[in-house]
Amino acid sequence: MDLIGLLKSQFLCHLVFCYVFIASGLIINTIQLLTLLLWPVNKQLFRKINCRLSYCVSSQLVMLLEWWSGTECVIHTDPQAYPKYGKENAIVVLNHKFEIDFLCGWSLAERFGVLGGSKVLAKKELAYVPIIGWMWYFTEMVFCTRKWEQDRKTVSQSLLHLRDYPEKYFFLIHCEGTRFTEKKHQISMQVAQAKGLPSLKYHLLPRTKGFAITVRSLRNVVSAVYDCTLNFRNNENPTLLGVLNGKKYHADLYVRRIPLEEVPEDEDECSAWLHKLYQEKDAFQEEYYRTGTFPETAMVPPRRPWTLVNWLFWASLLLYPFFRFLINMISSGSSLTLASFVLVFFVASMGVRWMIGVTEIDKGSAYGNIDSEQKRSD
């Protein structure tokens, strides 16, 4: 391991990233709370301000991927479709197999300049998580309980509110609903067999109702579906801890632009269309494992500097008072002060481990009998 690699793996560096992220995130959440005063006066101004505040938070995670880790992401796509990326609203359908696939989705949005306004279909529990969950609340993310009878009305209403959104956005959706594991895959394929659907080798059976209501609610506002299939070279198994340690990964992302007019309006036909899409995604993954590449032309959108500039701004603003506080605590020589410092350090350490732990695949959502019954009803 070289000197830079050794430096990147040190916990002190991780603590700095964690501190800057938490401190800046709480400041931004507070500013977002104050912007609520604008909502009854000028809703569109409220939205534009919160898009930029949202970027200040989410871009810090993208910075870790693109600048700290140096992870490369090659996009395989149709050269004729490429110029439209970032210039239109789109529903992005991304496979859900890796711990950092959400970061790759955010990186895609960042490379095309729409990260601040981009949306996700997320679990309702995440709305209560400080910083990211609260940030999402103010940027009108769509939350769901994954219980269709509860979600039918609330998700539809949230999506309809986005029809007059003033910024371009990608609406990122993991139709599989949870990360791929062998156990979840086995249960999912039992459901597929019971429903008479073809088996999938590299994906879980997609949840069709959420996708169908998204298409129906955003039709004539969203121009296309971007079918995104992600994989990593040399059987890499990327993790957020690896990114935090500065490990460089090599991603390939196959992006197909499908005009929304080609997606059926009828719910049953839309569901059948999505199942067919995932069968095609499975075939693309099969080809990738066989040949080491995806179809279409390989392109690498340039990194934009703004994620790094944003992090350097917050770091320069927050690190000086932080280190001055630590030095004063240590130099005081007080046993109580030193004990407090050790306690704060321990809590921060646990905080870093918790933030990493919530992304781990084996700690993902349950995918058992309840989900099986829900899939039978899709």
Image (cartoon, rainbow, N blue to C red):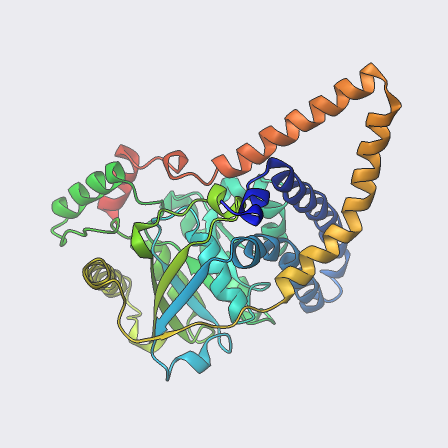
Q: Is residue 227 above or below residue 136?
A: below
Question: Residue at the spot x=82%, y=15% of the render?
Answer: 335
Q: Relative to residue 3, is residue 97 drawn left or right?
A: left
Q: Nearer the viewer, residue 76 or 246?
A: 246
Q: Is residue 282 above or below residue 219?
A: above
Q: Relative to residue 40, is residue 115 drawn left or right?
A: left
- The image position of residue 5, as x and y in percent, is 53, 47
Question: Residue at the spot x=60%, y=58% of the render?
Answer: 59
Question: Residue at the spot x=54%, y=65% of the render?
Answer: 110
- The image position of residue 360, as x and y in percent, is 42, 38
Q: Relative to residue 368, is residue 2 drawn left or right?
A: right
Quarter of the image for residue 304 reads bottom right
- The image position of residue 70, as x and y in percent, is 51, 58
Q: Is residue 221 above or below residue 336?
A: below
Residue 197 visible: yes
Q: Nearer the viewer, residue 87 or 79?
A: 79
Residue 53 visible: no
Question: Residue at the spot x=83%, y=33% of the render?
Answer: 327
- The image position of residue 273, as x and y in percent, is 24, 65
Quarter of the image for residue 343 reads top right
Q: Residue furthest front?
A: 2
